[in-house]
Image (spheres, rainbow, N blue to C red):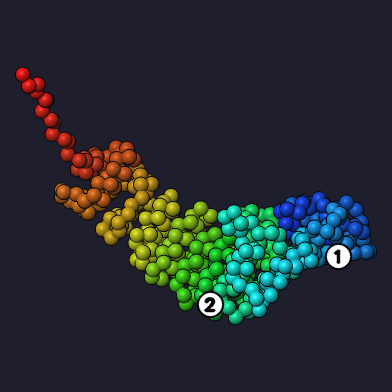
Amino acid sequence: MLPLLAATLASSVLLHVAIHVDAGTIQQIAADDAAGQCALGPSWLSCPAGSEPVHFRWGPGGEDWVLTGDTTLAAGQQGTALVLPPDRARADALARLAPDVVTEADIRDLFVRDGDHVPDPPSAGMLTALYALRTHPDKLVRRAMVEGMQPLCHVASLGPFPPDAPCPIPDDLLTALAKDKDKGARRRVAVLVRDLRPSHLDAEAGKILKRLAVDPVRGVRRAAMVSVARAPISGALDAEAAWCEALANVPQPGPPGRAACNTLARLAHQAGPSETIDPSAAIALVLDHHPERAWRVWTAWRDAVPFRRDWVDLLLRRTLGFSPRLLALWVQQDPDGLADAMHAWEPAEPHSERYGLIARAIADAEPTSPALADVVQAAAPPPEAPQPEPTEDR
């Protein structure tokens, strides 16, 4: 680190703040005893500090909102704080979260936005009470607890904090929930991680996804694979790590394996081929285990994987779908090879309905190859016989 930058950081404080969307903005936080003017971001303050600690408080008068958390920082320190209603204003809600009376309905009513229901702002004590339900004996309460946590760190503005706010979920809480004995709680953790905005939990979230990707319950594995596809965006995993996780799960039967195939396709929008990311090897693996999904994976990576006759033959014979975009590319790359594959698949009339659908998709790509023109012509419906002219009765 450059000496000047190190000295600057050592003589300042940095506060990350999650401000409830109804409370106000970062400009309304006062920094007492700061040694100069503070710099502001959407959800942070950086203030010069002298020999005295900097004390932060919610500036506007009244008792509707309070700043809680790391409100006093010495030079060189960083902290996180929340702007929420005081606990005394949410005493009734806090009472509903007591472990001996709380129900899953209480948690959803207090924390989860559903249709026209927008929960009242929680207090800091309510969040602490929610996190304490981690060890509740009722699995339905633990499931609802994860649902209640999801809006707190959602990537979209669907919760009580702006999308750029720090995530108030404590370290290691999600890891503990990912080990919950209830499969429903674990599956909900996988979904929460999918929608997690970039935060201090990124490294923890990546480890959680790797754990849940090999969970003994199929539904949990499938949810984890769906989340892996988004992991490079949130920062939980880099693209190559996400690729390796998805590739390792392709051989799984049923929904988990199919979800892994879909993840390989989605990752095409976030990375390109590399020594680790080999689209051809991935398509070969998908063809072995989930050939129907190979249409999607090959379409996503079509610019990196050219026409291969043996694979095309397999897709035509062993699957039910097709991809117009992939067919259009094959029309340009190897029109004669595609025509040969079509003839080998159904060499004589009458042709199947699927043959006709694929031939029409080829026609839409405007082929110039005579061989493909024959394919299109062979699949064309026969012309209707002319109807006799009606005659008038005389």
Question: Of all residues shown, which one is farthest toward the left?
Answer: 394
Residue 56 position by quadrant: bottom right
Location of the C terminus (image quadrant): top left
174 vs 370: above or below: below
| Residue occupying image coordinates x 69% and y 75% | 98
Residue 110 position by quadrant: bottom right
Residue 16, image x and y in percent? 76, 60
Q: Is residue 242 left or right of residue 74?
A: left
| Residue occupying image coordinates x 66% and y 79% | 100
**Which amino acid type is shown beneath numbered disc 2?**
Asp
Please rate how many residues cluster around mark 2, counting C-alpha atoms within 10 Å: few if below 14, some from 14 to 19, many from 20: some
Question: Of all residues shown, which one is farthest toward the right?
Answer: 51
Element marked by disc 1:
strand
Element marked by disc 2:
loop
| Residue occupying image coordinates x 34% and y 62% | 291
Q: In this view, does 45 lie to the left or right of 273?
A: right
Question: As rendered, which of 293 and 182 lies closer to the eye?
Answer: 182
Question: Of all residues shown, which one is farthest toward the top?
Answer: 394
Question: As rendered, which of 333 and 328 lies closer to the eye?
Answer: 328
Q: Which mark lies nearer to you, 1 or 2? A: 2
Please tell me which of labels 1 and 2 falls first in the chain: 1
Q: Contact (CB < 8 A) between labels 1 and 2?
A: no
| Residue occupying image coordinates x 64% and y 63% | 111
Q: Is residue 161 left or right of residue 146?
A: right
Residue 363, image x and y in percent? 29, 40
Question: As rendered, which of 353 and 132 lies closer to the eye?
Answer: 132
Instruction: Confirm whether residue 79 shows in the render.
Output: no
The dot on residue 72 is 1
**Which amino acid type is shown beneath numbered disc 1?**
Thr
The dot on residue 182 is 2
The dot on residue 179 is none
Q: Is residue 304 left or right of residue 180?
A: left
